[in-house]
Image (cartoon, helix red, strand yellow):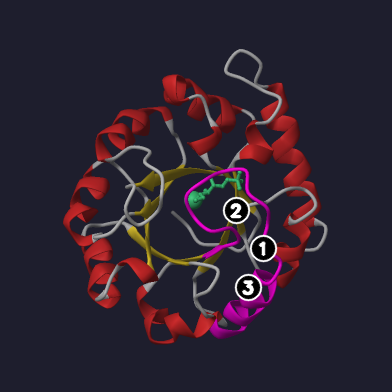
Amino acid sequence: MTFDRSIKIAPSILSADFANFGKECEAIEAEGCDWVHVDVMDGHFVPNITFGPATCAAIRPHIKGVMDVHLMIEPVDPYIDAFAKAGADVITAHVEASTHIHRTLQAIRGAGAKAGIALNPATPASSIEYLLDMIDLVCVMTVNPGFGGQKFIHSQVDKVAQLRAMIGDRPIHIEIDGGVTPETAPLVAGAGADVLVAGSAVFKGGSVNNTAPYGNNIRAIRTAAEAVAS
Ligand code: DX5
Ligand code: ZN
């Protein structure tokens, strides 16, 4: 993985056809996405359950680019090696899910993956002040984690701007997760985000047998974001 701040669109397969993950991953890459965002939920840290490392390993051969694994699980540490072995390029843990998040981030890098940290909407930017040299990505949740298709929380745009200032020249991606559409993408891209996760806004109107809408949806988000990205 090389680092740059160009806009990257990362469809969340939470909105894909769960019976066809392999084909869905191939379809969104063929339709022009940059990363594939994989939402792991445990029914404990968040009120929903998706899947675990075995599913990540099964879809890995169907993804040519970056597999971006977002862990909404608590605890995190016992599962890091399994997700790294499953082929995750980025493993993101929530700051709220680990008492010793510093140790968690060390373990993620130690397992050979890029380390991401996610912040729930109520968690301030300052929570990562002493972690900046240990992370490769910060994920700003613009919905409460657990479900796709929720409404974008506008107060988070200011948090993105604060994080962008804190990060300075460090090679740290700012990722936005939740409620990203062609309407909200410019708000966060203008504030300094470079990775835009989108579930419902990418998969809407399409299917594994009709993938062209995925491409149209990806281009609509990218065009709106690139118009304002610095
Ligand atoms: C929410 C997940 C998101 C979600 C985004 O808990 O982490 O990745 O799938 O879905 P949309 O884009 O539909 O808000
Ligand atoms: Zn996510």
Horizontal side of residue 203 vs 37, given as left or right: right
Q: Quadrant of residue 142?
A: bottom right
Q: How crowded is the residue under tag 2: few (<14 C-alpha within 10 Å), some, or many (20+)?
A: many
The relative height of residue 184 versus residue 42 in the rendered view (above or below) is below
Which of pointers 3 and 2 lies earlier in the amino acid sequence? 3
Camera-nearest residue between 207 and 73: 73
User: Who's the residue at 71% across and 22% down the image?
Assistant: 212
- Residue type, mark 3 in image: Val
User: Who's the residue at 63% across and 73% down the image?
Assistant: 160
The magenta stretch spans residue 151: yes
Distance from the alpha carbon under mark 2 to that under mark 1: 8 Å
Q: Which residue is mark 2?
A: 178
Answer whether labels 2 and 1 touch (C-beta < 8 Å): yes
Is the CB of mark 1 within 8 Å of ligand 1? no
Q: Quadrant of residue 87?
A: top left
SS of the residue at dot 2?
loop
Q: How crowded is the residue under tag 3: few (<14 C-alpha within 10 Å), some, or many (20+)?
A: many
Q: Quadrant of the N terminus?
A: bottom left
Q: Which residue is mark 3?
A: 160
The relative height of residue 158 versus residue 97 in the rendered view (above or below) is below
Q: Position of residue 116 (x, y in %)?
A: 40, 63
The magenta stretch spans residue 90: no
Magenta-colored span: 140-166
Judged by depth in the image, the label closer to the viewer, 3 or 2, is: 2
Q: Which residue is mark 1?
A: 153
Judged by depth in the image, the label closer to the viewer, 2 or 1, is: 1
The relative height of residue 35 versus residue 175 in the rendered view (above or below) is above
Which of pointers 2 and 1 lies earlier in the amino acid sequence? 1
Camera-nearest residue between 170 and 164: 164
- Residue type, mark 1 in image: Ile
